[in-house]
């Protein structure tokens, strides 16, 4: 029974992984926004690069999501 | 769970709802493209311009990321893009009985990702021979760093199919779970507050749900785009070796 409780606590703690992804995506798009503000002509290129970076940062959050699912639903 | 005759080597090969949804998305793609281009008008109508737009979108992406050599990979990347996009969208507008987003299952996405991985690896070895291994040693790196760089590059190369498949599956699963949780609020409100107050309070999650469905449709496009984009970036590595 104790272990069962620890599993849920672990799943909750795992949500902290998403915080990292959120910080990463925030940094990426703040950089992209200031880049566009300095050079509006390069908007398309900057946005595409930012999107690729955001996808890689998002992946880390999704990994923690997968970890939560594995903890909660895989017996 | 199919009949025993649908078993092959211990695996269930019966016609499941997953296979049905995949076939339906295939049929939808064929209908979208062939019927859209049926008239071949010089000034395209709405449908035809959508078909042409999807073609141009992928063709531009390949031209930017791989270059002229990428032309021969167009069929692969275009089919991957359209399949992932239509499977995502059919998951959103699930009108098939027992239909769901097939791209939320790692079995489906991993099959697509391993196809990309094998294409990149085999093409790289066929084109460059053993020089393909120089992919693991970026040029201009000091010699003493190489023992650290090479294992890292190797692991990141081998992790590509995993990250590609888990990204798509987890993003779709996360979105659909979020929608279910928000939609569940309405039911909980009605169950706990009674019908009149429950429906009044349920307007809030309903509005949120509408916004989130819009976001999810955007994510359907984004994930299909990312899948095709990463495929073309990986193919760029195989064609040009950094």
Image: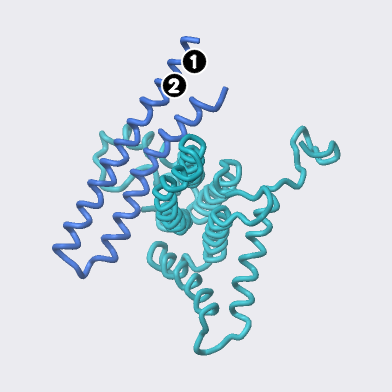
Chain colours: A blue, B cyan
**Residue shown at 16%/66% (left/top)?**
A39
Query: Residue B226, image x and y in percent?
Result: 43, 55
Instruction: Judge the density around disc 2: few (<14), some (14-19), many (≥20) Cα neighbours within 10 Å.
Output: some
User: How far, Cα to Cα, is label 2 from label 1?
Assistant: 7 Å
Query: Residue A38, image x and y in percent?
Result: 13, 63
**Residue shown at 41%/53% (left/top)?**
B207
User: Would you say the residues marked 2 and 1 are in contact, meaning their CB atoms lie under 8 Å apart?
Assistant: yes
**Residue shown at 61%/66% (left/top)?**
B29
In front: B11, or A20? A20
Q: Quadrant of residue A41?
A: bottom left
**What residue sits right under mark 2 in the picture?**
A8
Most extreme residue toward the bottom is: B42
The vertical placement of B214 against B180, above or below, is below
Judged from the image, the secondary structure of the residue bearing numbered disc 1 is helix
- In the image, are marks 2 and 1 on the same chain? yes
The vertical placement of B149 against B29, above or below, is above
Res. A4 mark: 1
Q: Quadrant of the N terminus of chain B?
A: top right
Q: Quadrant of residue A51?
A: bottom left
In front: B113, or B219? B219
Query: Residue B129, image x and y in percent?
Result: 50, 50
In front: A51, or B77? A51
Q: Chain of mark 1?
A: A
Q: Is residue B71 left or right of residue B4?
A: left
Judged from the image, the secondary structure of the residue bearing numbered disc 2 is helix
User: Can the viewer see residue B162?
Assistant: no
Most extreme residue toward the left is: A38
The vertical placement of B104 against A32, above or below, is above
Query: Residue A65, image x and y in percent?
Result: 43, 35
The vertical placement of B36 against B235, above or below, is below
């Amino acid at each position: 029974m104790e272990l069962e409780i620890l599993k849920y606590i672990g799943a909750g703690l795992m949500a902290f992984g998403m915080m990292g992804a959120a910080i990463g995506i925030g940094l990426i798009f703040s950089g992209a926004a200031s880049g566009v503000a300095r050079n509006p002509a390069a908007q398309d290129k900057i946005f595409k690069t930012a999107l690729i970076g955001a996808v890689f940062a998002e992946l880390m959050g999704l990994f923690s999501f997968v970890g939560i699912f594995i903890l909660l639903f895989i017996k | 769970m199919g009949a025993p005759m649908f078993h092959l080597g211990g695996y269930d090969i019966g016609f499941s709802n997953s296979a049905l949804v995949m076939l339906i998305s295939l049929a939808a793609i064929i209908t979208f493209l062939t019927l859209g281009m049926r008239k071949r008008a010089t000034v395209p109508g709405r449908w035809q311009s959508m078909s042409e737009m999807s073609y141009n979108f992928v063709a531009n992406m390949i031209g930017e990321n791989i270059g002229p050599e990428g032309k021969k990979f167009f069929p692969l990347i275009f089919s991957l893009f359209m399949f992932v996009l239509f499977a995502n969208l059919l998951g959103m507008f699930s009108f098939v009985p027992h239909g769901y987003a097939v791209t939320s299952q790692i079995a489906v996405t991993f099959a697509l990702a391993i196809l990309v991985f094998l294409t990149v690896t085999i093409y790289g070895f066929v084109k460059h021979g053993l020089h393909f291994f120089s992919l693991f040693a970026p040029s201009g790196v000091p010699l003493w760093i190489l023992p650290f760089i090479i294992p890292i590059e190797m692991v990141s190369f081998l992790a590509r199919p995993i990250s590609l498949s888990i990204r798509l599956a987890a993003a779709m699963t996360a979105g659909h779970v979020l929608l279910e949780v928000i939609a569940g609020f309405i039911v909980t409100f009605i169950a706990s507050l009674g019908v009149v107050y429950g429906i009044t309070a349920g307007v809030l999650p309903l509005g949120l749900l509408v916004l989130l469905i819009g976001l999810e449709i955007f994510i359907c496009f984004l994930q299909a785009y990312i899948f095709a984009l990463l495929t073309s970036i990986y193919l760029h590595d195989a064609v040009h070796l950094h």
